[in-house]
Image (spheres, rainbow, N blue to C red):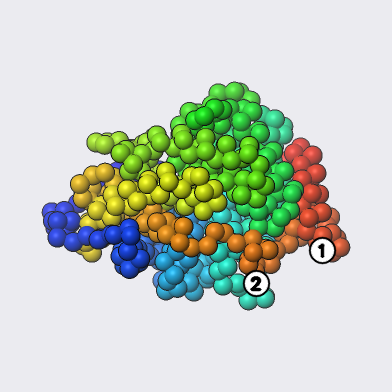
């Protein structure tokens, strides 16, 4: 849903001239103080603790998927800023929304949820595992388990009946977009597979990542060359031959940082080159090194909807991860992050509090836009200034303590799929089970069951 900028009172506009967020990228205290203000503003949109509201959900008009993205940002805030103020709330939200099968298909979303929606919660708990976020108690699902459950249930929806493979945008047939194979769903599956491969050391995840990448490149959702662009998606009605050529920051970031994970894990020059190619083409998202959403945001006009206004948050996050994992990318990424963070800080000078963030970071002051997406984006670009001062994502052999299960998400009947017969012995062999799940893609003909 496209949302027009609200009418802002003269009092709000006046506030931008007398209040704001000060940011010195070279000062830890300055970055911590600035992000504390932005994080507080982000949490103003959270109403999950209010009577009658749902834990984990943000106020309307923000959808469930963006809540998953926001908790990922708050988890990054804890890790980069070393501030545990919101940790109990983060943990509560991530666990409350897991659903009966612990696969992030909760009852309150089970008729409207898309593959990309599920994926963003999976990315949040994957980060919790990689950052050694405090593990849940033993009676609750663990972070790695939840990430594996998201991967497994998504992989089981791989559709070879149309376009030679790929995930549809929607999980359920009755939802608009079921006939569209979008990049964010497939890119997120690739990205999550890459992270699970690096964390667990299980080659099957890496094989899956390569499979998804090859399919996306094969139907030309990803271009080839020194500058690799990532397009929005394609319709199954024409067998994915007509590509929607929109380029969004978060799609670019999913493929870039996923490639960085695989290079860091394997040392394979192919993934190193791909990481650099995606970084090279990301220049289209920068105006004098200041990040903007080029597909919907210009210097004088904006058509970004609520969802799109949050995309820069995830791209900033993926830039930080890429810099951590591939040293050669650091000079360019840190230049972009620093310049963009300064732009974001000066935009966070609106609202009654004087530090509400805007959309256009190259605008002189606050531009009048505000919302959850704007706060998330400003927070992520600022806190990722510390990406090289904090440890790279942990793995199971370098300090990661989260416990998983290769059969996660398939131990009961997976949502929307025929039940799998997985024995207790099979569940004990995580690597083998993941391979079995790969083989069950012959069930691409076993379609979604209402």
- Mark 2 or 1, closer to the camera: 1
Q: What numbered label is drawn on residue 80?
A: none
Which x, y percent locates residue 121?
55, 56
Is 81 placed above or below 11 here?
below
Q: Residue at left 63%, top 37%?
A: 270
* Residue 351, quarter of picture: bottom left
Q: What numbered label is drawn on residue 428?
A: 1
Which x, y percent locates residue 415?
68, 53
Horizontal side of residue 207 vs 391, given as left or right: right
Which x, y percent locates residue 20?
22, 60
| Residue toward you, 363 or 437 | 363
Horizontal side of residue 47 vs 117, given as left or right: left
Which x, y percent locates residue 313?
42, 51
Q: Secondary structure at mark 1?
A: helix
Q: Residue 275: in sight, yes or no? A: yes
Horizontal side of residue 96 vs 317, given as left or right: right
Q: Residues within 10 Å of mark 2 (few under 14, many from 20)?
A: few
Is 165 placed above or below 328 here?
above
Which of the two labelled residues, at mark 2 and mark 1, occupies the earlier sequence position? 2
- Residue linked to disc 2: 140
Of the 4 image quadrants, the one containing the N terminus is top left
């Amino acid at each position: 849903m496209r949302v027009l900028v609200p009418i802002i009172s003269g009092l709000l506009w006046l506030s931008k001239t007398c209040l704001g967020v000060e940011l010195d990228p070279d000062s830890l205290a300055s970055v911590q103080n600035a992000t504390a203000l932005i994080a507080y503003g982000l949490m103003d949109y959270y109403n999950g603790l209010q009577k009658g509201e749902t834990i984990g959900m943000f106020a309307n008009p923000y959808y469930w998927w963006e809540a998953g993205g926001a908790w990922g940002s708050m988890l990054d805030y804890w890790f980069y800023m070393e501030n545990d103020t919101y940790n109990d709330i983060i943990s509560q939200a991530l666990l409350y929304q897991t659903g009966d099968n612990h696969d992030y298909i909760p009852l309150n979303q089970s008729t409207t949820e898309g593959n990309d929606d599920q994926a963003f919660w999976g990315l949040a708990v994957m980060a919790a595992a990689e950052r050694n976020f405090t593990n849940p108690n033993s009676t609750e699902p663990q972070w790695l388990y939840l990430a594996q459950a998201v991967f497994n249930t998504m992989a089981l929806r791989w559709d070879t009946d149309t376009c030679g493979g790929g995930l549809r945008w929607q999980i359920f047939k009755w939802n608009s977009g079921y006939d569209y194979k979008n990049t964010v769903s497939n890119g997120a599956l690739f990205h999550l597979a890459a992270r699970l491969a690096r964390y667990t050391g299980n080659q099957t995840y890496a094989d899956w990542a390569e499979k998804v990448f090859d399919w996306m490149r094969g139907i030309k959702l990803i271009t080839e060359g020194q500058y690799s662009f990532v397009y929005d998606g394609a319709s199954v009605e024409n067998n994915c031959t007509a590509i929607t050529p929109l380029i969004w920051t978060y799609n670019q970031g999913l493929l870039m940082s996923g490639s960085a994970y695989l290079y860091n894990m394997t040392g394979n020059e192919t993934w190193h080159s791909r990481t650099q190619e995606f970084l090279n083409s990301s220049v289209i998202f920068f105006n004098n090194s200041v990040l903007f959403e080029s597909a919907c945001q210009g210097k004088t006009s904006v058509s970004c909807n609520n969802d799109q206004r949050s995309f820069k948050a995830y791209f900033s996050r993926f830039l930080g991860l890429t810099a951590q994992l591939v040293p050669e990318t650091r000079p360019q990424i840190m230049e972009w992050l620093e310049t963009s963070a300064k732009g974001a800080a000066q935009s966070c000078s609106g609202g009654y509090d004087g530090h509400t963030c805007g959309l256009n970071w190259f605008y002189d002051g606050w531009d009048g836009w505000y919302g959850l997406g704007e706060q998330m984006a400003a927070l992520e670009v600022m806190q990722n200034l510390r990406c090289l001062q904090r440890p790279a994502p942990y793995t199971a052999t370098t300090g990661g303590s989260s416990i998983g299960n290769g059969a996660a998400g398939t131990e009961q009947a997976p949502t929307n799929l025929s039940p799998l017969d997985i024995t207790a012995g099979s569940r004990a062999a995580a690597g083998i089970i993941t391979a079995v799940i790969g083989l069950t893609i012959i069930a691409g003909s076993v379609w979604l069951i209402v």
